[in-house]
Amino acid sequence: MRRSALIRDGLVVLGLTACCWFGAAVSAHVRLKNPVSGSYLKWGDPTDVTVVISAIGSDDITDGSHTPAIQNAIAAWNEVGGTTAHLREVVTSVQRERTDWEANDLHMILFDEDNSSGYFPEGSATVAVTPIWFFSNGRISDADILFNGARFEFTTSGEEGKFDVQDVATHELGHLLGLDHSGWAGASMYPYVDESVTLHRSLSLDEVGGLRHAYPSASFGKITGSVSREQGGGPVAGAHVVARSADGRPARSILTNTAGDFTIFGLDEGTYTIYVDPLDQPVSPSNIGGGWTIETDFGSARAGTVSVTAGSTHDLGALFVPPSAGIALGRNSDNYPIACVIGETDFVLVRGSGLLPGSLLSCSDPDVVIGEPTWNGWSVMFQVTIPPGTPTGHVDLEAMSSFGELTILPAALEIAPQAPVVMSVVPAEGTIIGGTDLLIQGSGFRPGARVVLGDQVYADGEGCEVLDSSTIQLTTAAAAVGTRDVVVIDPAGPEGRRVSGYSFQDLPTVQSVFPDAGNSAGGTHVTLTGVQFSSGATVFINGVQQAAVTWIDATKIEFTTQSSPSLGTQLLEVVHPDGTRASSSFEFTAAQDPQLHLCSPASGKRRGGDVITLRGRSLPRELGVWFGVDPDTGTGGVIATEVTWINETTIEVVTPAHVPGHVDVLIMDMSSGQADTLSEGFQYETPPATGGACLSVSAPPGAGGGPMLSFLFGLALIALASRAAAGAGNSLRRAV
């Protein structure tokens, strides 16, 4: 951890750099603190913390996929319940193309490829850093995330020897929100990362507790108490106190203060078992930021069970821990969390000390089956079997020596689902303008999955839908020409990928059919809009070539329907001379097409309210009337809310308000979709000119022009003062 502080005029502004280190692995939620005042770091308005993903990206990633990877990391934090914290991505090109990441108004996520930031000198083992700037009361003024592109390589496609962008970004966003490293080996805020690890993509319950502590939005349960030594009774500072739920899963944690006191925050209703563990390995005091006093010269201890209800505080009183044990699980040379896949048996190796024959090994979740361990002094090897149906999440490992000494490794194992498998994408190609309906077929698809297609993210329920464990449905967004991988990412982090699974092509496409229904006897005039329409194109409905096809340009075709022997929705195809096809649909109905002949009177006030008569033929009772529609698509316009059907040839309408000018009038059968328009059928009149006016602000009697001048000058002073304050803030950001 590197820190800088500048004290000026009694105001303390501190800069702290939260890091993610490279090692064999990357750890109580722990809050970042002002190391001088001890105040927790937090945003003044956590509901709208803006972040900007640099458009420059990484030298290692040429397809722009760093953006959806970081967006998925942002989504992981935004999906936490019970907190007011929310990250909002700013997507404007002006902001994304900025390079002045140090500016207070910009919280940027970018790849530093040449150590221009100065945070990554030659030989640096830091994979990413989050410089955070804050005031003495802990209020964060700025935070940015820098990836060490000068020293390391990054990937979004699982390339060996490169760090996963989403995994690292999830960790660093926790720092940006004010969280320090976690004492849990499996948490996203574990302080080490390895190229082979992606499970930090999904948050642990420790991170959930951290956000609820910093930015609560509801009333949760709390557990309080104090930790003291069995021998001598003195308080233990920085003891790691963990609440484990009734199903054996670590749920929340906290560090004790210098007096040994603790409060575990953000607990859901339930029963919890408490234990105390020293923060020695694989997470150690050196991994935690300033402001904390952490003692590790004591042993692990279980400390009883307590039931928690919403909004309640339960005091456990004094908890006592034994002297340091001769047995310890966990070293940062292991890659945590250790993934254990549901329905499989895996071999696991955990390093530590004092891991001698005669010791006992167990898992906090009784459903997890631990095989007979092999003790080797500095390590223990064993099999782990995860029965089918076991919930995902973290579990603790415990070991007890033959002398009865206990050691606990919080969240050492992460029970993970089978990685999704993407077997096929149908269709395998579509238009660059988007709108293509895809079916992604495979296995292992779970609710909450996200699909990455190029630079777009489709979340379950927000752009795609997980229909079942083997099928996902989505509609493509617009994209540039090219072939893309189709990636399905499980909520826990594992992913499945269909390399080059979908191709965006510049294909002919029908975007609108207007009207999209007509009488089965034929004779309906239809306009098609789209892209890449070729001269000489023909139109077929249900295989029948349509009449009077007129190519207007590459975006518009008109035709007249032929009679249809059957009713209902039919396939509409535009067939181009080169054989390419663009498809949509058209519906034939037995009802006559409505026809609109005139509006009387044909003009009225722009504010609306005029009663006019529309005359035509086959006017249905369920009729909608719009003013100012697009004549080619039937979209837009303003609907009339008062329509009275007189008979099949006459209706009365109260005009809605509209801007002046001639407008097209649309009538539509609301039950069938049959429609007709009257081109420039109504005119909204421009009101007559009534002379000019000047808006003035009167000064108080007897004040003359002084108050207005003073008011304007006062605004100028305020603006100057704000600018001066902003300038001072910028100068205070300088690291010394």
Image (cartoon, helix red, strand yellow):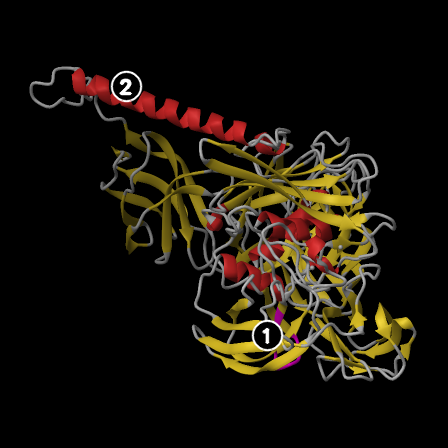
178 falls in the magenta region: no
The answer to which of 231 and 515 lies nearer the viewer is 231
- Give the mark nearer the N terminus: 1 vs 2: 1
Residue with the mark numbered 1: 233
Against 487, is 686 above or below? Answer: above
Asked whether the viewer can see residue 427, the reply is no
On screen, residue 469 versus residue 253, left or right, reads right
The answer to which of 50 and 66 lies nearer the viewer is 50
Numbered label attached to residue 713:
2
Camera-side mark, 1 or 2: 1
246 falls in the magenta region: yes
Q: Quadrant of residue 59?
A: top right
Quarter of the image for the C terminus: give it: top right
Against 390, is 186 above or below? Answer: above
Q: Residue furthest top?
A: 705
Against 415, is 721 above or below? Answer: above
Residue at horizontal 14 percent and vertical 22 percent from the top: 698
Residue at horizontal 48 percent and vertical 72 percent from the top: 221
Q: Amino acid at mark 1?
A: Gly
Q: Residue furthest left?
A: 702
The local secondary structure at tag 1 comes to loop
Read off the magenta span: 241-249
Against 657, is 440 above or below? Answer: below
- Please provide percent x and percent y for residue 51: 57, 42
On screen, residue 78 versus residue 147, left or right, reads left
Q: Amino acid at mark 2?
A: Phe
